Every structure is written in C-alpha cells, then in structure tokens.
Image (cartoon, helix red, strand yellow):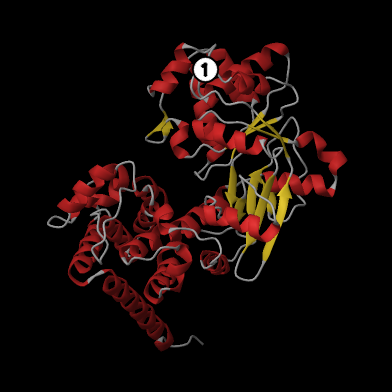
Amino acid sequence: MAAYMDDLMNDDFDSHREWGIVGAGILSFDAEKREKLASQDWLQTLVQRDADSVQARIIGSMTNFLPVDFELRQHTALQEAMEQPSIKIVSLTVTEGGYFLHNGDFDPQHPDMEYDIYNPGTPTTVFGMMVKALDRRRKAGIPPFSVMSCDNIPHNGNVVRSVVVGLANHTDRELAKWIDENVAFPNSMVDRITPGTTAEQSEYIKNEYGYEDASAIFCEPFRQWILEDKFPHGRPKLENLEGFKFVSDVAPYEHMKIRILNGGHASLCYPAALLGVQYVHEAMQHPVIATFLDTLERNEIIPTVGPVPDTDLHDYWQLIAKRFSNPTIQDTIGRVCFGGASNQPKFIVPVARDALQSGSTKVDGLALVSAMWCRYCQGQTESGETIRPNDPQWERLQLVAEQAIKDPAAWLRMSAVYGEIGDHAVFVKSFCHALETIETEGVEVAMKKYVEVTNKKAFDSDDVLDASPARE
C-alpha cells in the first residue's frame, strides 16, 4: 500500500497529503521495525527487479510509526490514534493466524479474545482496540473509520467484520449492531511477491546505491490490488494508478489468484523440496517440476476457476509462470512450503472438492500434490537430507506421514485438512496410487507418469472429437 500512496503523492501531493500512512504494530518485531524506520525518518527503499530490469525508489508515504509496547501490551499510542477524526482508514495485515478463528469462525474462547471481552477498557489486541475506538467515535459523533484487510485470505473484509462485530457482541450488543450497520469492511485482493529482505539484498543497496537501508524492500515489478469501493467517509483516488482496480465484487479475482498463483506455489514447493531445489525460480527451470505444474494448472486447476472480468485464465497462468521464474526475487522453497496444514485446505483441497462435486474425475494431479506433501512431512528429502520442522503442526504431521507409509489413507483421515474429499473414493484411490508410486519409484517418476497419462487422455479425447462425423 505504501508504494501506491507514494505514487499518488508524487503525482499530486497537495491533493493527497492527508493520506499519509501512520505505521503501527503490537508485537516485538514491530518494535524492531519501528526502531529501524525511525533511524531513517520513516523512509524505505523499494527495489523492483526481474531478469530484465531493476528499478529502485525511496518510499516516503509513511509519516510516523507509533511506539510499540509489546511487553506491557498497553498500546496507548495506537488506541489514541484510531480515535482521531483524521484517521479515515485502518488497514491491517496480520496473517490468517492473527484473526482468532476456529474452523473459519470467530473464536471468543481464545485467551486473547477472552481478555478483551472481560477488559473492554484496556484491550490488548488490535480488534479489541478497534471496538473501543469505534465506540468512542460513535459517542463523540465522529464518523467511523473503514477497516481494510490486505491479508491473503478469502473474503478478508468479511472475516474482519466477523471478528470485530463478534467481539463487540460479547460486550455491547447495541455497539455491535451499530458497527455492523455503519462501518465499512471492504474485501480486497493484493498480489505482489515480496519475500523477506536478506542480508545480501541489504548489502546490494549499499554497494549499488551508496547508502545503507535497514528496512529495504525487494519485490517483483508486477503488482495488482483489487478493492471493493466501500469507503463512505473518504478514500484516496487510487483508481488511476497502474495495477489498481476498484470493483463491486472482489471474489472472481480473489478466486483466480488463490487457485492459480497460491495453488501453483502449493503444488511446486513439495516436489522441489524433496528434490533439493532451493528457490522457486529454480523449480521453474526443473524440466519435470515445471512440466508437471503446467499440466496440473491447465487440466485441473484452471477449469475450476470460473470467469473473471476482462481476463483470459490461460494468459493469467502464463503471467504467473513468468513471475515464478523471476531469478532476482530469491523466493525460497522453504518459505513456500511453510504451513502446509493451513495452506493445503485453502489452495488445493477446495480445487479437488469442486472438481469432484462437478462430476469430474480429474484429480490425479491434485492427489499427487497431497501425496508429495505427505512424503515431505516424513522429514527427509530423496537424497536423505533432514527436512527441518516447517509447520506449527509438524510433530503431528510427521507422525501421520510415517503411518501413511503402510496405510496411505491415514493421511486423508486428517479431517481438518481434507474434509469430505478424504472419504471420496476417486480421490482416495488417486492419492494412494500416487503415494505408492512416490515411495517405490520416486517423486520425479510420479510426476512424469502423471504428465504422460494426462497428455495421453487429452490426445485420445482430441482423436475422438476429430473422428466425429461433421454435421450437414
């Protein structure tokens, strides 16, 4: 968001000066980030690069970063800021785990939520502080701010609404009703591959540009921000910026990105890890992994996406493949592999479920992805190197993965991951066959066989069509 706001200010500062960004956080690493940014007057270098170009700029849209009291958890500065009339939008990126959900719904029994419910005057979570700030603004006759999530979760605005309204419901039902009726929670889809900055990249800034930046950002040139236009009390004029679009419904774009991009990441990372590949761009250079992913996207993932306004899905996949192939991003396979127990139910399982519900049996590639994730969780690459724990549920995953060596279906009995497709005969058969192939012949052979069988089926189908008599 900072880059978009910086663009606006560079284009027409006088018209957008009121839309400066005030940074905030409540965790220890937020305090560290603030210290770094304070030392350089809230400025950051943004480096966009790919194989063909490099562009660096100084981002100056942040005007402050509030003090962070992560030890006492008394976030006075943040609380006071959200109560100010000048704050029109509260944007947040807290990751899925920061929304206090249980099975997709607001969890009032989480200890942090319980604290805010019983101590509404001194909340410690950002959601409790939002409820308190909105209550005070309501009582003072100040219009509410809009709440804008930029997290990579489906229907992120709806999720934030469920948490804020759900929390308020436990303390003041009248306030909860007012929030639900008066506060905007626009859904959004943000897309730009931006891995964490490495020491080597920080050194690059120093060597290439002659200064040090303790908080530099490296990313790809591509950017896309799709946002519902629901800001009743004001917003910046983002609509003319490159890579930005206001829409009435984010869902089609969100669906496309989650399935084709995130699903692509979730599909290539485990074979890459098992074969000792270190980076995403290297996986795209691997002849077997790249061919497998392309075949999977075209035959099993894209057919479940549905129409997206002004978008050719196969062209979109080609764009994603090019972005994955960017060698300058240095996006690690380890990063993409992290959190499979959370990512697979979002990016892979729903694709298989939708295919099966539509009557299709094209799930062999998706079942193979699950089998490769299972093999990964056994904790060793194919060359015998140890895979370090890479999931908050790693111990349980490793135990079940080892059980699956003799009982493959044990992996699918993780109902929190697979739900109904864990019992679907077609998916179970495909998964068991894939895992057996991996265990006996290896990951590369399993991927090659999938590609060969899929291409043969497509060729045979074309032959049938070609042989059909033409109608008069």
Indicate the position of residue 169 as horizontal and vertical percent values.
50, 18
Is 274 situated above or below 154?
below
Give the quadrant of residue 229: top right
Q: What residue is disc 1 on?
A: 123
Q: Is residue 384 left or right of residue 55?
A: left
Q: Is residue 368 left or right of residue 13?
A: left
Asked whether 199 or 278 is in front, the reply is 199
Indicate the position of residue 290 as horizontal and vertical percent values.
42, 72
Q: Residue at x 59, y 23 (%)?
A: 130
Of helix, strand and loop, which one carries label 1?
Answer: loop
Question: Can see residue 130?
Answer: yes
Q: Is residue 377 left or right of residue 464?
A: left
Is 82 situated above or below 11?
above
Q: Residue furthest left?
A: 406
Give the quadrant of residue 20: top right
Disc 1 marks which amino acid? Answer: Pro
Indicate the position of residue 457 as horizontal and vertical percent values.
34, 78
Is 196 situated above or below 359?
above
